Image (cartoon, helix red, strand yellow):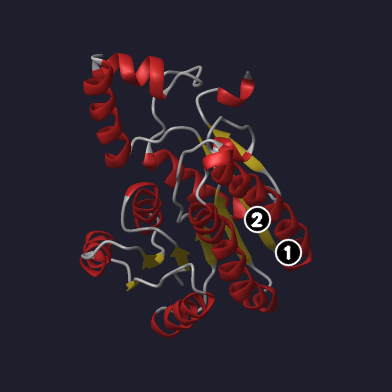
Amino acid sequence: MSKNVLITGSTSGIGLGIAREFARAGYNISFNGLEKNGAEIAAAVGKEFGVKTFFSDANLMDPAAIEKYIGETEKNLGHVDVLVNNAGIQFVSEIENFPVEKWNAIIALNLTAAFHTTRLVLGGMKQRNWGRVINIASAHGLVASEFKSAYVAAKHGIVGFTKVTALEGAPFGITANSVCPGYVDTPLVRGQVADQAKTHNMSEEDVIAKVMLMKHAVKKFVKTESLGALCVFLASDHAELITGTAIPVDGGWNAQ
């Protein structure tokens, strides 16, 4: 019997890469995202891999919308076996000039939304004595960078919340882990590379190595497929004793 995975922020970038790997492994996918063609993206993945899909454009900053999304997922696919909290936003500014509304939005989406999704599926996982919670944190869940106060605070919070989830879930066959990527190869990031190359009059290769991946020991972007494969492994029975961890996938950033 196939399992169901709910992945927030899964119609583009990292989330879509993770969704594709779960679909490849035979999981039914509950998609969520802001893309206008999100339903088509979900359906296309389902058709490609022969799995069931569901899509919701639920606003994850609204607890009531999250609760509705979880309920609709259970109605359309069945109970949530694996939860992947991936949705997130970023804003960069020095602390004294950081817009309060941006701070509130980043904490709401990057941290509080994961609390709400987790609280809504954890009870059912406990009843079934099996579950997986995978939180996509960041290298910034383990270290800090200037001008990213809200993002770093939220991602450190996710790593801590993951540990609590792991401890509470342990007696019930539930694991919880954080995945902490460095810079990931997404269309959004590739666009930033092109913009910075023009701004600094540098080649895109130099922007990648000297600007974007300055803190990566291995000067390569993380692949979304690699993050997806790791998440699929963490959801497997082979990973039943891996819980409460924060796993860096950052080219050696955290080794420094």
Secondary element type, mark 2: strand
Mark with earlier residue (2, 1): 1
Note whether 14 is above or below 222 in the view shown.
Answer: below
Residue at x-position 69% and y-position 72%: 129
Instruction: Report if the CB atoms under discs 2 and 1 are less than 8 Å apart.
Output: yes
Quadrant assignment, res 166? bottom right
| Residue 25 coordinates in the image, percent (x, y) | 40, 55
**Dot 1 alpha-carbon crowd within 10 angstroms: few under 14, some 14 to 19, many 20 or more:** many
Can residue 83 be seen by looking at this rendering? yes
Residue at x-position 54% and y-position 45%: 151
| Residue 209 coordinates in the image, percent (x, y) | 38, 16
Work out how far the residue at label 2 is from the one at label 1, CA to CA, in angstroms. Answer: 8 Å
Q: Which residue is mark 2?
A: 176
Q: Amino acid at mark 2?
A: Ala
- Which residue is situated farthest in the front direction here? 97
Q: Which mark is residue 27?
A: none
Note whether 28 is above or below 134 in the view shown.
Answer: below
Secondary element type, mark 1: helix
Q: Is residue 56 left or right of residue 97?
A: left
Q: Which residue is mark 1?
A: 169
| Residue 114 coordinates in the image, percent (x, y) | 57, 62
Quadrant assignment, res 26? bottom left
Q: Amino acid at mark 1?
A: Gly
